[in-house]
Amino acid sequence: MTATLRPAVSACPACAAAPTAQALADSAGPQTAQIALSLPTIHCSACISKIERGLNAHPLVNSARVNLTLKRATIAAAEEVSAQEMVQLVEGLGYEAHELDAGALNATATGEEGRDLLMRLAVAGFASMNVMLLSVAVWSGAEAATRDLFHWISAAIALPTIAFAGQPFFRNAWAALSNRQLNMDVPITLAILLAVVTSLWETSLSGEHAYFDAALTLTFFLLAGRYLDHRTRAIARSAAEELTALEVPRAIRLTGEREETVMVADLKVGDTILVRPGGRMPVDGEILTGMSELDRSLLTGETLPVVAGPGQAVSAGEVNLTGPLTIRATAVGADTSLHRMADLVAIAESGRSRYTSLADKAAKLYAPGVHILSALSFAGWYLYSGDLRTALNIAAAVLIITCPCALGLAVPAVTTAASGRLFRRGMLVKDATALERLAQVDTVVFDKTGTLTAGTPELTNLDKLPRQAVGIAAALAQGSSHPLAQAILRAARQAGIPAARVEAVTEVPGHGVMGNWQGQEVRLGRAAWAGAQGLRETATFLAVGDAPAVAFIFADRLRDGAAELVETLRQSGKEVYLMSGDTTPAVEELAARLGIRHWLAEALPADKAEHIQALGDKGAKVLMVGDGLNDTAALAAAHVSISPASALDAARVASDIVLLGGDLSPVSAGCDTARAAIRRIRENFRIATIYNIIAVPLAVAGLATPLIAALAMSTSSITVSLNALRLR
Amino acid sequence: MNVLSYLIPISLVLGGIGLIGFIYTVRSNQYDDPEGDSRRILDDQYDKRPKK
């Protein structure tokens, strides 16, 4: 089966009437499927042409196109071509390739919005340049009829441009007003409209001052800010989407004797599903046949696998470790325990939406101030001169000069620079206000399994074990994909101990591996099965013949950079907490190893969220770092949250920032960058205020001319942008 | 001043051509892969199957 995403060939009704495009697409093949591949290692033009040539050479591929920016390949191929086949083909060419779930890649929606903004930005840019040319002629002394002509031409350019390019502001302002609120877009809209109206009026009376250029440059600069803002988030969002798309949700359904691979979304209650070792449970269900062990760490935080046998219930998200299992689905899709967790997240999230961004705070102060100032100067001049025209002109000048051009750029210019910097270090900032919230953090809460630890066990007592025992264990371990077996193999290989000659190695799912060594039966596995007493730590046992079993003890390996991160966080004066669903000894041991004083073990998902809520109520700004399903509610409840790329999809969705790569150390650098960014934003606000302090008295006094307005606006916008660039 | 009667329309038309060109490039997805496109021009193979 291939991911079948068939794009509409032509969306316009006229094309439907003339079915050429459709016919052409159909003639290309009876059934075409779109396959998307992620190609993380491509970097040059040779890579592009090699992969495209290789893919296009395949007889069933209609077209293949590599996108170097996204490091992706899109392939249109006949229905029967499978994505695995394409992955193998590309890997055969010497490049790493992963299949992407085409359904999860909806970058087109964000692309559409970005394109719309870009188009408006271009139109505003074109119009403002032309009008500025005409305005320069007026400022340098065009008189009488010539000036009027120039003003009329400016009006002819400005009116349609503003009607088109200003729409995002008008819409937002209207939305805010209809909710009886004020946002930054209200003064913007008012300034633009008032400028156009007074300028038209002035022009029709052959007046001296017209602000068409100001209205247009204002729109242009503000749109540039919006576009920057949008692009920063679009990049992070598409990268996050790619993480999701890398996990193609498929399952093997058994119908009678036949195995068929289907999308998880197509599974129904009562279906019989085969889950191979290493596979993840696609749905909630009950085990019909098979013995195995389940890794539940992503759901509960427990590191120890649990034995699973017929009749036992399994939840979506658990990983099957040793033997194949057939399960009967009892809950699918939105009813699975994985999805029920989303309710907890929704509750926790409602708390966070109360956060008001710096820009909104500025707008709350600024918008009423500007409106009052402008209204006062209108009233004052009207009473003083009795001339409506003068009063309106001055009111418009005040609005234009104070207009939040620099304020509109102050935040997006900085966040773009900061997010770009974090992106290069492997942090995806998904949320618009995440940086601001990250800068306030004073308490950091870590999850244990999969966050501070890599989730892969490590053999700790290798030097105390006899070499022969390690050799036998290594030989047996080769017959299993169980994480503990893999850990023994790694340790033996590193210590240079060769595997012993063990014959007839068989895996007994749920128990361990057995074999025959020099005529004796050898067993590697659970305590009871190998005839030993269980230990407090994670351990597996090797029994050789009738001799007493030898214990292999494991500890979860620390993630790269975890120790350094905890150390730097503590040094910078932050409180560090450890909250885990794992057993008390395991959590206590790790807390001691990292020097974390506050820890909580055997915590249920709701416990974690409650603790974080309690910390927040005490006034702490909590950063939650977690990866499991049991962390999602806590991630959403925290002030700001980070999850590693290896986390479950649900956890990544609930968190504000996703950490690419296995290293944790960028987190502390991220906090520093966020604080630096907030400093810049505040500086920018101050710069914008200074410009206003200079220019506003001129405007209120009636001394402002369109030239002064244009100068103030451009210089403040440019200063603010340059200040943001200093962050790099 | 008569010079204005054709200079202004010319400047508007020239600017307009640039704007239309830009709109055309946005509409035809020419900014989807800036990295790749900048490398493709160095490729001597004729790209006869551009993305639709």
Image: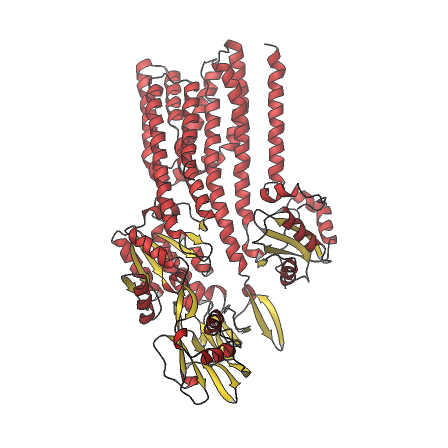
Q: How is the image coloured?
A: secondary structure
**Residue at (59% x, 49% y) in the render:** A43
Query: In x, y percent, where is residue A191?
Result: 41, 27
List the single residue furthest toward the right: A27
Q: Can I make out residue B29 in this image?
A: no
Query: In x, y percent, where is residue A335?
Result: 46, 66
**Residue at (42% x, 68% y) in the render:** A297
Q: Quadrant of residue A717?
A: top left
User: A310 above or below A317?
Assistant: below
Which of A128 and A41 lies nearest the eye of the viewer? A41
Q: Quadrant of the C terminus of chain A?
A: top left
Q: Quadrant of the N terminus of chain A?
A: bottom right
Q: Quadrant of residue A582?
A: bottom left
User: A493 above or below A158?
Assistant: below
Q: Can I make out residue A210 in this image?
A: yes
Which of A154 and A540 lies nearest the eye of the viewer? A540
Query: In x, y percent, where is residue A536?
Result: 34, 76
User: A386 above or below A566?
Assistant: above
**Residue at (37% x, 63% y) in the render:** A448
Which of A59 and B7 lies nearest the eye of the viewer? A59
Query: In x, y percent, where is residue A397?
Result: 39, 22
Which of A243 and A590 lies nearest the eye of the viewer? A590
Q: How many marks?
A: 0
**Residue at (52% x, 89% y) in the render:** A519
User: A709 above or below A316?
Assistant: above
